[in-house]
Image (tube, helix red, strand yellow):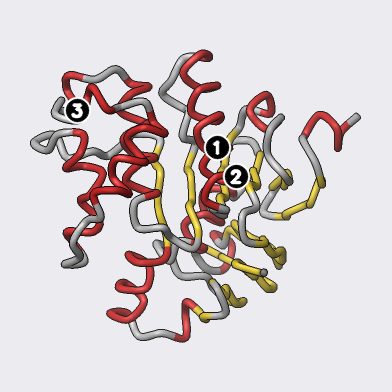
Amino acid sequence: MEILNVQDLCKSYGKGEAKVDALKHVSFSLEKGEFAAVIGESGSGKTTLLNCIGALDTPTSGQILLDGQDLFSMKEEERTIFRRRSIGFIFQSFQLVSELNVEQNIIFPLLLDYRRPNQTDVEEILELLGLQDRRKHLPGQLSGGQQQRVAIGRALITRPRLILADEPTGNLDSRNSRDVIALLTSASRRYRQTILMITHNRNLTASVDRVFQVSDGILTDLGGTADEALS
């Protein structure tokens, strides 16, 4: 089942001699439950791609279909609601609410949407993340790795159609980075959760299903892991 379809996506900034083409005719699709990574150097266009897919930025041209819905044919308010219910975000900087504890941070997206959390789902996610004994801790009482686990739980709780992970290990050491990738892989398998992750670290792509590379705004499908595709 196709969850994401990106067709001929272009994004440009500026005009005339100052014009920069950040994305050049990008096309690809993801199936339900697929865990894909986008690798690329800083400035390659990978973050722009993620922001357009997440409807945080507006493409210059092209089409993005999420579960058959055209993101940019919607009115702004409709798109905001659809994004909140259909896309989970995991950021490099965690972006947790400092005044809320672990459990409250995880259920926060549901409360924003005036939805009652299912406690069974909350307990299952806390168990998956190994945070049962930290559920009442504030973000400031957690390690960086634990904070990123909370961010993963927050992305999972709404059962979104797609999770977008923006350099989710960028602020973590190597051990915590491996743990985060293992948790994302587990979520993909356990919940058939579709995940698109951007990273500059090729070593973190060993367990994903597909790897894309962005270079100078052009997307290339490398197939399996980065090492396999480049060997």
Q: Residue at x 27, y 27 (%)?
A: 132
Residue 189: mark in rendering: 2
Q: Earlier in the sequence, mark 3 or mark 1?
A: 3
Residue that label 3 marks: 139
CA separation in Å, label 3 and label 1: 23 Å
* Tag 2: amino acid: Arg
Residue that label 1 marks: 186
In the image, residue 136 lies at what x, y percent? 14, 29
Q: For the residue labelled by badge 2, is the local secondary structure a helix, a strand or a loop?
A: helix
What quarter of the picture does the N terminus occupy?
bottom right
In the image, residue 25 lies at what x, y percent? 71, 67
The front one of 22 and 130 is: 130
In this rendering, position of residue 227 left or right of residue 194? right
In the image, residue 196 lies at what x, y percent? 57, 50
Most distant residue in the front direction: 120
Q: For the residue labelled by badge 1, is the local secondary structure a helix, a strand or a loop?
A: helix
Tell me if label 2 and label 1 are in contact, CB under 8 Å: yes
In this rendering, position of residue 149 left or right of residue 189? left
In the image, residue 178 lies at what x, y percent? 55, 21
* Tag 3: amino acid: Pro
